Image: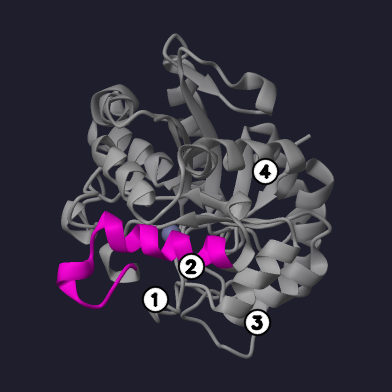
């Protein structure tokens, strides 16, 4: 079954590989695995941990765009939902963390948009000029600049990702944004109580907001018990979310790390080590009681509907 994966740090990998002298990073490291797993759509994130400046952000985003365009025979860049192509690998450009933006916020958001970015989070785990991540000060949320960024993203139809936010930032964004939001790669604290996962209260708020939650395949966000760090227990998080707010708010954002040097495939669920294995999750979604139509919604349709709702 075809899958849209809402989060993979492919933008980060592209620039890192280009800098190491690999001139075909997308083709040699990603396209085959994605095709094998039937991951027909993916959000390729330019990922920033909090120390990078605006120039570095621009460089990663530009490199990702160029790499996509270089492969345009096989890849379609999603700038609007009209760009989906049945025969090609569909790629949406995203940004994870905007630590490089400290002033001239609206202009910089415009630059990201003009260069293809359609989905972004204000921070990673860090605390930056715009917002506060889950490892930052719990009492600090969105800054005034952060509010400006949210408003500009709303005007442009750029999707807002809240996955790494601390709780205060999450609630500030919900109050500020006029458009639905997405947690692209977060599970539930009910089944695995870590700060990267969502409380039931947050999940309910995303439901009321018309938002979306993508299931994350990183093993430490699925379960504490190593034997339970698999696609079945990940699907149980999906079951919990759908039971709380409805299956139409559920999607997939695996955060595959097999290609990231510091992490590797051992950071992932036992049977979800890289994109080629994603059909194991499709099977597990059936096992926890979702019917064929619901699994299609989770894997593909809900993500595309959300894009349709937010993107211009
Ligand atoms: Zn992340």
Compare marks 4 and 1 and give the one earlier in the sequence: 1
- The residue pinned by badge 4 equals 306
Left or right of 20 in this view: 99 = right
Locate residue 288, reporting x and y percent: 37, 56
Name the residue at 30% across, 38% down.
Answer: 279
User: Disc number at residue 191?
Assistant: 1
Of all residues, the one furthest to the top in this rendering is: 73
Name the residue at 77% across, 47% down.
Answer: 107
- Is the CB of mark 1 within 8 Å of ligand 1? no
* Relative height, residue 218 to residue 248 (above, below): below
Residue 67 on the magenta span: no
Left or right of 150 in this view: 302 = left
- The part of the image, by quadrant, that contains residue 166 is bottom right
As helix, strand or loop, the secondary structure at mark 4 comes to helix
- The residue pinned by badge 3 equals 168
Locate residue 157, reporting x and y percent: 77, 42
* Magenta region, residue range: 222-243
The CA distance from mark 2 to mark 4 is 20 Å
Which quarter shows the C terminus?
top right
As helix, strand or loop, the secondary structure at mark 3 comes to helix
Q: Nearer the viewer, residue 111 or 202?
A: 202
Image depth: mark 1 or mark 2 in front:
2
Compare marks 3 and 4 and give the one earlier in the sequence: 3
Crowding at label 3, few (<14), some or many (≥20) Cα neighbours within 10 Å? some
CB atoms at circles 4 and 1 under 8 Å apart?
Answer: no
* Relative height, residue 180 to residue 116 (above, below): below
Image depth: mark 2 or mark 4 in front:
2
CB atoms at circles 1 and 2 under 8 Å apart?
Answer: yes
As helix, strand or loop, the secondary structure at mark 1 comes to loop
- The residue pinned by badge 2 equals 240
């Amino acid at each position: 079954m075809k899958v849209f994966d809402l989060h993979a740090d492919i933008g980060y990998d592209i620039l890192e590989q280009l800098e190491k002298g690999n001139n075909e990073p997308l083709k040699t490291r990603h396209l085959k695995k994605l095709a094998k797993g039937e991951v027909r759509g993916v959000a390729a994130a330019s990922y920033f941990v909090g120390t990078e400046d605006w120039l570095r952000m621009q460089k990663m985003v530009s490199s990702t765009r160029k790499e996509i365009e270089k492969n345009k025979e096989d890849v379609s860049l999603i700038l609007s939902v009209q760009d989906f192509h049945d025969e090609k690998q569909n790629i949406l450009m995203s940004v994870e963390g905007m630590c490089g933006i400290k002033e001239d916020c609206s202009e910089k958001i415009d630059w990201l948009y003009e260069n293809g970015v359609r989905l972004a989070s204000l921070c990673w785990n860090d605390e930056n000029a715009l917002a506060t991540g889950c490892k930052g000060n719990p009492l600090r949320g969105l800054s005034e600049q952060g509010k400006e960024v949210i408003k500009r993203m709303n005007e442009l139809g750029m999707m807002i990702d809240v996955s790494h936010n601390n709780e205060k930032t999450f609630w500030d964004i919900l109050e500020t944004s006029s458009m639905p939001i997405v947690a692209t790669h977060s599970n539930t604290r009910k089944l695995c109580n870590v700060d990267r996962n969502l409380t039931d209260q947050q999940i309910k708020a995303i439901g009321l907001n018309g938002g979306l939650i993508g299931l994350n395949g990183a093993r430490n966000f699925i379960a504490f018990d190593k034997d339970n760090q698999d696609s079945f227990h990940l699907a149980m998080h999906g079951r919990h979310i759908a039971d709380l707010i409805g299956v139409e708010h559920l999607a997939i954002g695996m955060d595959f790390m097999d290609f990231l040097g510091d992490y590797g495939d051992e950071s992932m669920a036992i049977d979800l080590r890289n994109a080629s294995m994603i059909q194991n999750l499709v099977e597990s979604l059936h096992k926890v009681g979702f019917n064929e139509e619901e699994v299609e919604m989770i894997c593909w349709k809900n993500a595309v509907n959300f894009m349709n709702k937010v993107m211009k």
